[in-house]
Image (cartoon, rainbow, N blue to C red):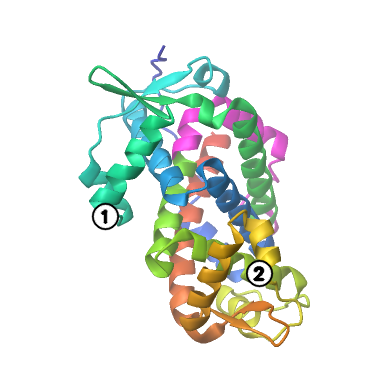
Amino acid sequence: MSLNINIPEKTKKFKEDGIKKTIESHFNEIANEWWRHQISWTYDAYDTFKDHDKFLIVIYLIKKTLDTNTKKFKEYSINQFYTQDKIELEKFNIVEVSNYFGIPKETTRRKLIELEKKRIIIKIKKKQMLNTNIFNLNKQINLIKKISTLLFKFSKILKKNKLMNRIIEPGEILKHIEKEFTFCLKLYYDLQLKISSCWKGYFNDLESFNIWALCVTNKSYNSPKEKNKYIKDYSNFIIDESSENGLNGMTISDMTGIPRATVVRKLKKLIINKNLIMDNKKRYHPNGFHLKKILLLQNKNIKELSSFMAKIFNQLEN
């Protein structure tokens, strides 16, 4: 089933640069919401297969398929999408996937074989199909609600700074994403793939990023309210300021879903690499040693987030 839609030319009211500058200059107002959203995303990513890389491979294949569908003007609402128990994946090869994620070819091959054994990816003659039941309707509705809440809170800041004429309520955003489901999902997956690849390139694996990000988020929530609005000043305060509110290994394991033995191993590596420090009560805190590099990566990710928001808000206002 496909829908052939003629998409009219739309004016671009919201510019990526304007949104990016607003986020950077008012980062203290949105940091907690943004980090909480990302922690939720990484938790769900790991929880799906207990393997971040497998999850991202599947997301990559879906996103590639949706890119092709968009070019062919094939768009689906959430209900239309979930009338299918399988979707045909765009053609891909192991080298392509391996190069995108920086995973060895043999590791990529093994993970794809495991996905086939679990009937996530199903070969039917020369076609490769994806079992849509891995992302059931309820899970996707919950994801859309989280995205809608995040965009609503960003719209409040943009309205406050006169980049928007109104605050867009979460219910309106939710209905829009449900209607334009595959197009919005493509944009969101593109955002998360770029952010995940960025942090994976720095930490070498996403489990380490997940653990580090949780410690940063915990610090942000439990520190005194920071008045510095700019992203550089705020990040310096959060990552480099001492605090009593660290996390222990058991709590990190419970909150990330990552096995305790893996958490312990990753924590040791994060301390050696000076990304985290441990206090005398064996609680873990972010370390500001690599702050300059972290800021460069964060700015890159904020640029991607701004691009995503500009595209969604422009759709909503046209």
Q: Position of residue 77 (x, y in %)?
A: 53, 22
Main secondary structure type of the part rendered in magenta: helix
Residue nearest the observer in this picture, 192 or 309 = 192
Q: Position of residue 157 (x, y in %)?
A: 67, 57
Residue nearest the observer in this picture, 263 or 242 = 263
Marks 1,2: beta carbons within 8 A: no
In the image, what residue type sits under mark 2?
Gly
Q: How far apart are the two marked residues, 1 and 2, measured between alpha carbons? A: 30 Å
CA neighbours of label 2 inside 10 A, class few (<14), some (14 to 19), many (20+): some
Q: Is residue 10 left or right of residue 259?
A: left
Write the start and end of the magenta stretch as one range. 159-186
In the image, what residue type sits under mark 1?
Pro
Residue nearest the observer in this picture, 163 or 217 = 217
| Residue 202 numbered mark, or none | none
Q: Using the rendered image of the protein, determine whether residue 165 is visible from the camera's viewpoint.
A: no
Q: Where is residue 288 in the image (x, y as percent from the top left)?
A: 55, 84
Verify whether residue 133 appears in magenta. no
Who's the residue at 71% across and 34% down the image? 171
Residue position for label 2 = 249
Q: How many marks?
A: 2
Q: In this view, does 231 lie to the left or right of 1?
A: right
Q: Using the rendered image of the protein, determine whether residue 141 is visible from the camera's viewpoint.
A: yes
Who's the residue at 51% across and 64% down the image? 209
Residue nearest the observer in this picture, 151 or 207 = 207
Who's the residue at 40% across and 22% down the image? 87
Verify whether residue 161 appears in magenta. yes
CA neighbours of label 1 inside 10 A, class few (<14), some (14 to 19), many (20+): few
Residue 192 vertical placement versus 125 (above, below): below
Who's the residue at 45% across and 41% down the image? 187
Residue position for label 1 = 104
Q: Where is residue 183 in the image (x, y as percent from the top left)?
A: 46, 32
Q: Quadrant of the N terminus?
A: top left
